[in-house]
Amino acid sequence: MWLLSQAAEACFDTPTWPTDRVFPQASIEFEVENADAVAAAGGELERAGFDLLHPARTEPWGQTVARLLTDDGLIIGISYAPSLHDERA
């Protein structure tokens, strides 16, 4: 698990977690096929009524990720990290 300040930076670009949000207790990320799949999954989650912490975005290190927070404090990420994929396949 991240430090709370690191989770806040990753989700809100600030070291302070918003007091109007459930404090995260754990996080899990699901790796998908490509960056477009992250955006598609984020859109599907929003259409299903989920409030994303942030939509799909590409981080400076190349990972594309969208995240949501469950009512019980689980940060769920839909992620594509190019370094985890063999692009030659």
Image (cartoon, helix red, strand yellow):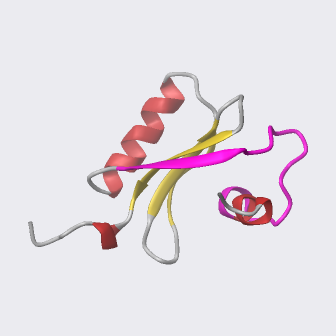
> Looking at the image, can residue 7 be seen?
yes
**Residue 20 left/right relative to 22:** right
Write the start and end of the magenta stretch as one range.
Answer: 10-31
Q: How many labels, in total?
A: 0
**Would you say residue 59 sits in the magenta stretch?**
no
> Looking at the image, can residue 54 be seen?
no
Vertical relation: 17 (above or below) 88: above
Instruction: Please state the horizontal and vertical placement of residue 86, each as a whole percent of the image.
Output: 18, 70
Give residue 50's quadrant in the image.
Answer: top right
Q: Give the residue at the far top of this rendering.
A: 48
**Would you say residue 26 sits in the magenta stretch?**
yes
Instruction: Please state the horizontal and vertical placement of residue 43, each as a whole percent of the image.
Output: 45, 36
**Residue 16 left/right relative to 76:** right
- The quarter in which the N terminus is drawn is bottom right
Q: Give the residue at the far bottom of this rendering.
A: 61
Q: Give the residue at the far right of this rendering.
A: 19
Q: Which residue is pictured at 48% across the width and 56% down the height?
A: 65
Vertical relation: 89 (above or below) 22: below
**Residue 3 left/right relative to 20:** left
**Residue 67 left/right relative to 16:** left
Instruction: Please state the horizontal and vertical placement of residue 13, each as a whole percent of the image.
Output: 73, 64
Q: Which residue is pictured at 40% across the width and 39% down the height?
A: 41
Q: Which residue is pictured at 60% across the width and 41% down the height?
A: 68
Instruction: Please state the horizontal and vertical placement of residue 89, each as a whole percent of the image.
Output: 8, 66
